[in-house]
Each structure stands twice: as structure tokens, then as C-alpha cells.
Image (cartoon, rainbow, N blue to C red):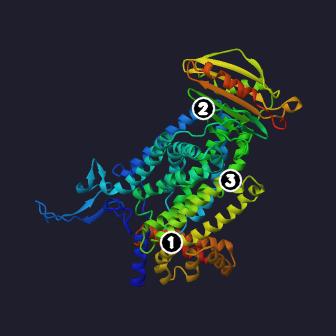
């Protein structure tokens, strides 16, 4: 009996706890002459309803739930994989880093997360920008932080532990065209090359209260040099709010 | 006792499934295995998600679990109050809660939302996605993901999950599980966004924001959605209402959309400060409308179940009206007795008697006799 049918769902084995029910049988009596009215213990599935030890009458809701779950779990990711990114950065596009702060992304890269100036707007303390090109990604993440850019980079490293194998380069100071000072540290490992640059997006006395920004570049092995100029231009273009 | 009243009582017990025990462990039942796979895979996903940064973000995770654990208490008291009439067993409601919290959140919503959010960004651009993707994603993945718990419970307990009111209560518990587990996820994500700076401060901030919005969020959406699904399925005679059911489900999804895309709906303007309250009020009005509609079948069953007791004089008609009625009837009963305490005791005693009658399948057992004598004793108390 299908549990979805009106008034459905009473399986003999569900009657509590032992149910006596009439079994329709072509043989009204057993060999010993006992009537075919028998007790059915809890959980007993009649032979004609069994399939691999399961009660076939329980299949409809289970299969419907499983099918919908699998559609959501695997159908959507499959559809996502079939659709290509088509959100290319064009000349003149400017990234919105929130509160008036901006950066100029490299032309031709795909903007996979984040908004451009004039778009939906961005919050500097919950910023999530992802730019991608062949073999390289640049992520920009904003958050609140009281302290210097150097201390912020320490905090980032501490939060991620030492799980990633690789060799860290020396920390260097990096200053953008608008005067924003950042701290950069490169890494090299078997999975590729990387560069983390921490900023406090402000200049002068505004630095203390300014939101923190982490620019994280990751490339496949041997690809960093190919994107170095574009990444450098992006970093130099970071401008705090109220400067332009 | 008239034969008619007894027949109506037995029919109410049969149709409502009240008094039936619930067993989760049913190895012969395919729904049990799908439930086990969903919750098992969800649990693995939880370990993976929190495992890598678990030690560093322990203050946020522990704080989130404690705060949202406390947040559960008033919710459980509220839902216990609404789980009256032909009440659902605690085990069934716990099963619903953990489907919502573990399977719907971590098995289904986490990967499915990630994929669909990205699809919207690819199709409409990142600015469109920032405004609308959340509201075009969560109502599909999350409402259906949660409702699958109700479908599996129909498979696990077909006699217990019968009316739209059952769907309403079970949906609320699935949604509550989803809310609490998702909120802990948000606490973790909030701490990770700031790379672990001021984790307790972030946790408290997230608790205030998510706790307040949770009042008119997942528990409400799922209660409406699952009541609608039960109307569509029509599992009790005369309760099938496909149009009404689909409307209820779409309404729940529309509420979810409005709640998640408030930024897009307000156009980034000052409307954003008013919208949460406006949407919340509309949601609550619709919630109580659906609750009232869904309760009508349960109220009729309660009346039929206690009908023979009215005939024998154990229960008087005003008490029957209050026990099977809504807030208005209970208030009128309290007023007629001039004693809130006595009314509360009599209503609880009536609930006990109804439960024992249902559990005994309408037979006169020693427990039924005791519940009856207790009610008579309570009636004589001041």
C-alpha cells in the first residue's frame, strides 16, 4: 500500500505490538489442520512484499526523497560545471571594495565573486572577491582588525596553522599608488606559488580604524611569473575610500 | 454511551493514528535507510567542515553551540504548546529535528546552495547574484531539502503523519533543527571571515542577529511548507486541497525569498530598515491563518475522541469546547470557571484522558479508568 494514498499507511506489521490478521491463502488449512489466522510479529514483512530484505511497500516515499536529494546534490553541481563563466573584466571596470575603496582588476580575468563600482555594493568588513584567469586566482577578503597590516598577516597565518606544505619568503613592504601600505609574503610549494598581501585600507591617521584587506594570489606551479605584472598592477591600484 | 459516539471515537483513533508508538529503527523500511544515509553523510560533512579549523575556532564553535542550545529552550516550549490535540511522539519530533539540522543543512543545502549560487552568478553576473542569488537559491534547495524529512517520516510512520497539522508541527521541528545548526555554521563562518579575531564578540553579535531573525525564519517557513505538502497529499479523508497546498508551499518559498533578498528588494535604500518588520508581520499573520486551517481536522478528531466521555458526563460540553478549541475557546472556559489554575488543570487532565483512550485504541483499560478518575478528582478541586 502506498503511504501517499489517502488513508493509507496501515501495514499489518505496524499494529501495536502483535496483531492478529487474516491471511488470504488458497489453502484454508495447514497440514496440521490449523486455521490460517496467525499472529504477525512486529517487523515481519510478508514474503510477497519483500525485496532484498526490505518491504517494497515502503519504497515510494524513500525513493522520492532519495531522487529529490540526489537531484539537488549532484544535479545542480553538474549543471554548474556545464555552464562556463562569462563575466570578463573589461577595460575601465573598477572593483568595489566597500566604503568607497576600489581596485582596478586585470582586463580579461573572470570576476567570479564580488561587485564592480556601480553594482550591488560591498561591505569592507565582509568583502569576498574572486578573480580567476588560466592557472591563477586572486581573492580579496575584508574584515575588521585593530592593529597593523603586519599583525593582520600574522593573524591570518596563525588561523590557518602550518597545514600547507611550502616555503615562505621574507616579508616585504608594499605601497600602493594611493599610499596604502601593505605587507607581502610569498610562498612556494608543490601545489603552486602564492602571495599574501595584508593591508589596512586607509592612509594617514585613518589607518588605525580602517578595515583590513587580505589579497591572496594562488597560481599553479610555474605560472606566477606569467601573471606577475597583472597582479602587481592590481595591488598598486588599491585606493582607500575618500581619496579619489 | 451511544453506538454512534463510540464509532466516531474509533474512527478518530484510526484516522489520526494517535497513541501509535514511533520507532526509528526499522531495518526493513527503505525510508529508514535513506534517513540514515542523509544524517550519516551530513554528520561526515559537519566533521569535515569544522574539523580543519576546529581547534583554532573552538571559542566560536563552543560559544555558538551553547548560545543556540539555550535558544532552543523557548522554541521547544512554544512548539510543545502547539503539539496538542493528537500530539506527536517526542521520538518522531526528534527525528524531524535532526533531519533538519544534519541532513538538510549539511548533506543537501551546503553543496546544493554552493552550486546554485554560482549558477546565478554565471548567468546573471556577480552584481545580480549579490542582490538576488540567495533568495533564488535557498527557497528551492532548503525548503525541499527540509521537506524531504517529512516525506521520510511519512514512510517511517504512515499512521502518525496524517493531517496538515501533523505536517505543520513536524515542519516546525525540521525548520528549528535547520535554524540552529545553520546558525552555528554562520558563527563559524563569521569567525573565519575575520581569521579568528574577537571570536566571542563575533559569536554574540551573530547570536543576536540570527536569533532575532530566526523567529520568523526556517521554523515558520517549514511549518507552512510542510502543512501545504500534507494538503497536497491529502492523507486523511476530506483533507486533500491541492490548490491550497501548493499556495501554502509557494507562500513559504516567497517568504524565504523576501527574507534572503531584502537588500535587493529595498534597492539599497532606507527601506531596508522597515522591510524586516513588515515581512515579519505578514509572515506571522499567514502562519496563524495556516495553523488555524490545519488544526480544524485535529480539533474534530479530539471532539470525536472525547464524545463518549461527554455522554457519560465525565467531560462537560464547555470543557470539550476548550480542549478541542483554539485560544478563544480556552480563554472563554477560563473565564467561565473564574480560575485560571483550575481551567489549566482540567485541560491537562482532559488531554491525559484523550491520550490514554487513543493509546488503548478506545478500550477501557486501567490507565483509561485512572485518567478518568483523575479528571473527576480535578473537577472537585477548588
Q: Is residue B76 visible?
A: no
Q: Chain of mark 3?
A: B
Q: In 3D space, how far apart are the residues under numbered discs 2 and 1 (Cα atoms)?
A: 57 Å
In the image, residue A9 sits, relative to residue B47, either above or below, namely: below
Specify few, some or many for label 1: CA neighbours under 10 Å numbering under 14, 14-19, or 20 or more.
many
Residue at 83%, 26% (x, y): give it.
A179
The residue where tag 1 is placed is B298
- Say if residue A70 shows up in the picture: yes
x and y, in percent, of residue A127 in the image: 70, 38
At 72% from the left and 37% from the top, the residue drawn is A94
Most foreground residue, A134 or B272 = A134
Residue placed furthest toward the right: A205
Residue under the image location 75 percent in, 17 percent down: A172
| Residue at the spot 52% in from the left edge and 68% down from the top edge | B352
Q: Residues within 10 Å of mark 2 (few under 14, many from 20)?
A: many
**What x and y, as percent, mark residue A8?**
36, 66
The foreground one among A207 and B36 is A207
User: Left or right: where does residue B170 sit relative to residue A48?
Assistant: right
Of A50 and A217, which appears nearest the observer? A217
User: Tag on residue B264?
Assistant: 3
Chain ID for label 1?
B
Q: Are marks 2 and 1 on the same chain?
A: no
Mark with earlier residue (3, 1): 3
Residue A72 in percent (x, y) is at 47, 48
Q: Is residue B107 left or right of residue A240?
A: left
Residue A132: mark in rendering: 2
Q: Nearer the viewer, residue B43 or A116?
A: A116
The reply to the same-chain question for discs 2 and 3 is: no
In whole angstroms, how far apart are the C-alphas of marks 3 and 1?
40 Å
Name the mark nearer the viewer: 2 or 3.
2
> For numbered disc 2, what is the local secondary structure?
strand
On screen, A13 above or below A133?
Answer: below
Amino acid at each position: 500500500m502506498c503511504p501517499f494514498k489517502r488513508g493509507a499507511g496501515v501495514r499489518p506489521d505496524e499494529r501495536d505490538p502483535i496483531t492478529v490478521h487474516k491471511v488470504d491463502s488458497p489453502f484454508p488449512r495447514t497440514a496440521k489442520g490449523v486455521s490460517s489466522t496467525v499472529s504477525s510479529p512486529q517487523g515481519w514483512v510478508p514474503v510477497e512484499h519483500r525485496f532484498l530484505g526490505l518491504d517494497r511497500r515502503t519504497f515510494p516515499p524513500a525513493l522520492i526523497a532519495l531522487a529529490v536529494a540526489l537531484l539537488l546534490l549532484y544535479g545542480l553541481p553538474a549543471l554548474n560545471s556545464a555552464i562556463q563563466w562569462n563575466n570578463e573584466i573589461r577595460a575601465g571596470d573598477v572593483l568595489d571594495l566597500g566604503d568607497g575603496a576600489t581596485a582596478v582588476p586585470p582586463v580579461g580575468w573572470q570576476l567570479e565573486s564580488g561587485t564592480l563600482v556601480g553594482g550591488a555594493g560591498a561591505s569592507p568588513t565582509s568583502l569576498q572577491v574572486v578573480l580567476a584567469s588560466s592557472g591563477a586566482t586572486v581573492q580579496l577578503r575584508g574584515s575588521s582588525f585593530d592593529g597593523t597590516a603586519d599583525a593582520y598577516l600574522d593573524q591570518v597565518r596563525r588561523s590557518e596553522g602550518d597545514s600547507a606544505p611550502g616555503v615562505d619568503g621574507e616579508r616585504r613592504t608594499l605601497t600602493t599608488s594611493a599610499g596604502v601600505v601593505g605587507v607581502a609574503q610569498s610562498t612556494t610549494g608543490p601545489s603552486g606559488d602564492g602571495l599574501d598581501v595584508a593591508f589596512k585600507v586607509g592612509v594617514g591617521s585613518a589607518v588605525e580604524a580602517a578595515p583590513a584587506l587580505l589579497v591572496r594570489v594562488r597560481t599553479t606551479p610555474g605560472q606566477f611569473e606569467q601573471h606577475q605584472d597583472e597582479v602587481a598592477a592590481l595591488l598598486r591600484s588599491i585606493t582607500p575610500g575618500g581619496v579619489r | 454511551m451511544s453506538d454512534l459516539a463510540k464509532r466516531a471515537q474509533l474512527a478518530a483513533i484510526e484516522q489520526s493514528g494517535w497513541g501509535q508508538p514511533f520507532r526509528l529503527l526499522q531495518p526493513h523500511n527503505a525510508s529508514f535507510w535513506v534517513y540514515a544515509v542523509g544524517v550519516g553523510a551530513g554528520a561526515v560533512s559537519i566533521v569535515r567542515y569544522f574539523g580543519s579549523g576546529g581547534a583554532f575556532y573552538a571559542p566560536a564553535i563552543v560559544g555558538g553551540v551553547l548560545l543556540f542550545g539555550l535558544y532552543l529552550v523557548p522554541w521547544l516550549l512554544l512548539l510543545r504548546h502547539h503539539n496538542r490535540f493528537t500530539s506527536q511522539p517526542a521520538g518522531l519530533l526528534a527525528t524531524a529535528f535532526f533531519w533538519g539540522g544534519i541532513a538538510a543543512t549539511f548533506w543537501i543545502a551546503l553543496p546544493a546552495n554552493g552550486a546554485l549560487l554560482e549558477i546565478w552568478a554565471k548567468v546573471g553576473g556577480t552584481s545580480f547574484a549579490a542582490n538576488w542569488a540567495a533568495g533564488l537559491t535557498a527557497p528551492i534547495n532548503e525548503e525541499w531539502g527540509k521537506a524531504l524529512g517529512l516525506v521520510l517520516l511519512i514512510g517511517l510512520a504512515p499512521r502518525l503523519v496524517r493531517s496538515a497539522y501533523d505536517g505543520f508541527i513536524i515542519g516546525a521541528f525540521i525548520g528549528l533543527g535547520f535554524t540552529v545548526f545553520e546558525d552555528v555554521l554562520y558563527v563559524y563562518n563569521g569567525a573565519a571571515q575575520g581569521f579568528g579575531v574577537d571570536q566571542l564578540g563575533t559569536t554574540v553579535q551573530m547570536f543576536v542577529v540570527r536569533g532575532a531573525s530566526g523567529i520568523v525564519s526556517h521554523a515558520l517557513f517549514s511549518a507552512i511548507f510542510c502543512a501545504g505538502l500534507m494538503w497536497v497529499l491529502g492523507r486523511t479523508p476530506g483533507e486533500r486541497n491541492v490548490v491550497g497546498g501548493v499556495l501554502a508551499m509557494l507562500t513559504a518559498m516567497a517568504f524565504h525569498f523576501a527574507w534572503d533578498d531584502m537588500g535587493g528588494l529595498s534597492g539599497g535604500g532606507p527601506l531596508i530598515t522597515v522591510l524586516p518588520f513588515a515581512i515579519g508581520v505578514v509572515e506571522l499573520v499567514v502562519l496563524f491563518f495556516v495553523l488555524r486551517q490545519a488544526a480544524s481536522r485535529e480539533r474534530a478528531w479530539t471532539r470525536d475522541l472525547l464524545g463518549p466521555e461527554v455522554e457519560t458526563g465525565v467531560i462537560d460540553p464547555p470543557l470539550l469546547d476548550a480542549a478541542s478549541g483554539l485560544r478563544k475557546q480556552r480563554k472563554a472556559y477560563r473565564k467561565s470557571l473564574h480560575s485560571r489554575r483550575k481551567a489549566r488543570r482540567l485541560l491537562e487532565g482532559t488531554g491525559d484522558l484523550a491520550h490514554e483512550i487513543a493509546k488503548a485504541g478506545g478500550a477501557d483499560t486501567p490507565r483509561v479508568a485512572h485518567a478518568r478518575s483523575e479528571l473527576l478528582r480535578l473537577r472537585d478541586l477548588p
